Amino acid sequence: MLPALFLNAVYWYRYNRKNQFANYHRQIWALLVALIYYFGSLTVVLAAARYSYLDTAIYYPAAILPYNLSALFLAWGLFYHNLGWMFVGTFWSAVLGIFIYQWQAKELPKLHRGQIMGLIIIFLISGLPIYQNFANSLKYTDTYGSNSLNLNKYRPFRNSRSLAKLNHPTSVKITANYPRLNGATALYPMYSAIAQTLYPKVSTKQGSQLVRVDSTPKAFDSLLTKKADVIFMANPSKAQFRTAKRHHVYLRLTKIGTEAFVFFVNQKNPVKTLSTGQIQSIYQRKTIFWSSVGGRFASIQPFQRPEGSGSQTAMEQMVMKKHKMVKPLRYQEFDAMDGVFDGVAGYNNRTNAIGYSFRFFATQMMHNRQVKLLKVDGIAPTAKNIRNGKYPLIAHFYAISRDQPSKNSQRLISWLRTDDGQTLINRTGYVGLK
């Protein structure tokens, strides 16, 4: 913006020099009228939008020809806070160009007291974007309260009450050459309980090295680089399969359970159910208002996860299928899943966002009372509806190893398909195959 304002000052200087204006008053008045209209209308719209630059950027640009293209560019680049400075800067850079010409032509105006007071008032008003930015920053305070994810309670070999257990000794015990485990955050309680059940002689310190929890992309990379022996995640994406092929790693996928892929909104959002088609339309940005799907008249903020994450892959494969999602804006993508929940609970103090995850993570690991799960095609994502297949978005999760796993890795994976293994998966809160 600064180079543009510099060019604006140069333009007004050359314009005055070409026409040899001796009277600057009409130019200043014209600039002042423009400032009052553009910056004044922005101030009114901002106040009406409760100082949310996001909503302002949606509705405001259409009313401000010829600045609308500039405003749309600022909105596209998420430089909302520069809207006010753009109008203020345009005014003062033009005044500067006029002043330089008047000074060069030795025709500097003699200002009387009223004009001086007027310039002081305009100067003070020009500082209003500072307050607007401050008021907007207050909107980003999460008044709903953050329910940050606590993974410590799921760490194995600590006698944690949060981990599922069997009521009897299991036939399989691994006492040496322990398989190193990693996986998606959402599945950590499950494979942590698996390790605690099958590794009876492991200490807490040793357990932290054998059982790691990473995001899905990092866990997948750990398998390719031989830093993990077995990982637990949803079906890999096409890009991940291609990456494995480039590394000459052939994957062995063993299906061990099922889980519902769920969508959630703020508790105050009146929408209770969406069809699969409506969800596709929202993430294609064809449906942009909640009023189009039975809610209030408010813009929909569709949050996403990074490419390669388990939930993003499930979203692409299960929900969107052949439909392509619109690339999210910078603030609409969250690296961590708990960030999506906190965002839906109160991003910018608004209740108009939607996000997605897996059922267990949403209901057991987060415990965020400010969000609610939606029905999809009128069916709630309950364990019963997952087992009977009524819920339309059911994903399998897998134990994944390299093509020739170690003997103990194969023992662990095979055990997961037994009655004991399936019982442990069910007791964790997921839905097993049995």
Image (tube, rainbow, N blue to C red):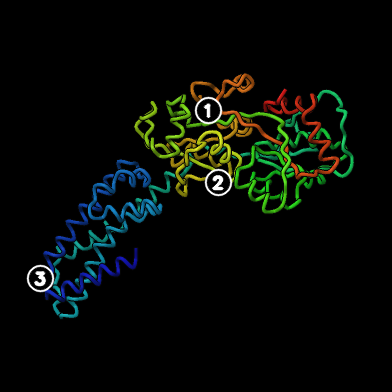
Work out whether 334 lies above or below 260. Answer: below
How many labels, in total?
Answer: 3
Which residue is disc 3 drawn over?
Answer: 23
Work out whether 433 lies above or below 159. Answer: above
Q: Earlier in the sequence, mark 3 or mark 2?
A: 3
The answer for how far apart the CA atoms under marks 3 and 2 are is 58 Å
Marking on residue 306: 2
**In front: 180, or 270?**
180
Confirm whether residue 65 shows in the render: yes
The answer for how far apart the CA atoms under marks 1 and 2 are is 21 Å
- Give the residue at x 56% y 41%: 312
Query: Type of residue at label 3?
Result: Asn
Query: Type of residue at label 1?
Result: Leu
Marking on residue 373: 1
Helix, strand or loop for disc 1 = strand
- Give the residue at x 57% y 31%: 261
Q: Earlier in the sequence, mark 3 or mark 1?
A: 3
Q: Earlier in the sequence, mark 1 or mark 2?
A: 2
